[in-house]
Amino acid sequence: MRLALISDIHSNSEALRAVLSEIAEAKVDEIVCLGDIIGYGPDPLNCIDLVQEHCSLALLGNHDFACRTQPVNFNQVAREAALWTRFKLDTAWPDDAARERRIRYIDHLPVRIHHPRDSRLLCVHGSSRCATNEYVFPDDLQDAMKFDRLFERFDNICIEGHTHMPVVFEQDLRLDEEGTEHTSYQRFLGYREEMRSPGPDGTGTIRGAANVTLRLSEGKKYIVNPGSVGQPRDRDSWACWAIMELVEDQDPKVSFRRTYYDWHRVLEMIRRTEHDDNCPYQLDEFLGTRLERGF
Ligand SMILES: [Fe+2]
């Protein structure tokens, strides 16, 4: 089975459409979305529709939840964006039936689920022990106790999003000659020092996690984060996603991809929310300018 993994779309339909068209060329069996379909960006309704149409499975993210309830523990920009999104979710576009369908879809997203066709995969938005809200950052690897607790809550592979950074963590558990267990952790991908200069051709630039393929050993355990489609934060503005190959009797493989999209159009859409007199909220321009920085 070939799975496309996407996460943290954040109402960025420009990025999502670009990624979906590359996924169509990649001939996958299914697309799994790891949450935060909405929040931050300017096009929540089309993003929900596209995820519902294309993804076999989608998880609830903390922003999806906040946009349907109350934003709690959000900074001011995120809070206002959640309230703006909540207002938009109540828009009957193009009709009441579409509004009800979207709300029902978000309200029924699971928070923690094993993939129906391959139970090796635990799917969450945040982490294995706090499915919607816990961050597992690349630098957290220094906290071995945190990783012990995270890895004891699943058996094989945990796929998650939330940090907007593509990364793979590996747990290696060995017994020494006296039968004592030794656990070690390793990180692949993660932060980059270089910033990628923007542009559709990518010439002369360094792209984070692009075309990196990792083989996951059957006897070890993994956390896999495909990065963010709609708001990458690893200093690369191109949308980030991954393909996971799961074939019986073979080591699983995960390939990371980057996709160009026009973030200037998203910035323009965000700026236009300022002129919507019918809505008491607006999106902060920072949510558009940060897309170009990829951070
Ligand atoms: Fe997110």
Image (cartoon, rainbow, N blue to C red):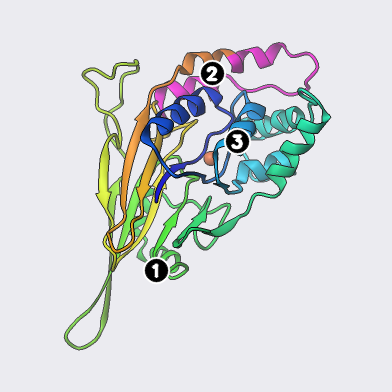
Q: Which residues are magenta?
A: 269-295
199 horizontally vs 48: left or right = left
Q: Earlier in the sequence, mark 2 or mark 1?
A: 1
Q: Residue at x 30, y 34 (%)?
A: 208
- Above or below: residue 181 compared with residue 158: below
Name the residue that disc number 3 marks. 53
User: Could you tell me the amino acid type at mark 3?
Assistant: Glu
Give the mark count: 3
User: Could you tell me the amino acid type at mark 1?
Assistant: Asp
Name the residue that disc number 2 marks. 266
Farthest residue to the right: give it.
Answer: 96
User: Could you tell me the amino acid type at mark 2?
Assistant: Val
Membership of 278 in magenta stretch: yes
Name the residue that disc number 1 marks. 148
How packed mark 3 is, by other alpha carbons closer than 10 Å (few <14, some 14-19, many 20 or more), is few
Membership of 263 in magenta stretch: no
Q: Earlier in the sequence, mark 3 or mark 1?
A: 3
Q: Residue at x 64, y 42 (%)?
A: 64
In which quarter of the view is residue 284 placed? top right
